[in-house]
Image (cartoon, grey):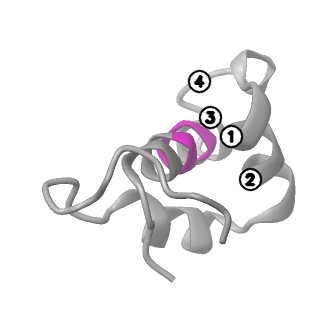
Amino acid sequence: MPARSKAQQKAAGAALAAKRGETPKTKLKGASREMYKSMSEEELDELATVKRAKLPEHVSDD
């Protein structure tokens, strides 16, 4: 499941860094904190490695 927006990709990248121990999990907020709790490292890696050039900044929940 690739990221649908730049914001989602950024949140996944932050959560992935915390999963890998590169940043403290206490620094996570909002969506990245929820992603950290609910997703595996492999799922986060898949979201975080999407090319950003073609992604919109945000996507509605529709």
**Residue type, label 4:** Thr
**Residue type, label 1:** Ser
Whether residue 24 is in magenta: the answer is no
The label nearer to you, 4 versus 1, is 1
Region rendered in magenta: 11-15
The reply, left or right, for residue 35 in relation to residue 54 is: right
- Indicate the secondary structure of the residue bearing disc 3: loop
- Indicate the secondary structure of the residue bearing disc 4: loop
Q: CA distance from mark 3 to mark 1?
A: 14 Å
> Which callout, 3 or 2, points at the residue further toward the start of the chain?
3
**Residue type, label 3:** Gly
> Which callout, 2 or 4, points at the residue further toward the start of the chain?
4
Question: Mark 3: few, some, or many residues within 10 Å (few <14, many ≥20)?
Answer: few
- Residue where numbered disc 3 is placed: 21
What is the x, y in percent for residue 15? Answer: 63, 43
Q: Which mark is residue 50?
A: none
**Residue type, label 2:** Met
Whether the residues at callouts 3 and 1 have beta carbons within 8 Å, the answer is no
Question: What residue do we see at 37% from left, 48% from top?
Answer: 6
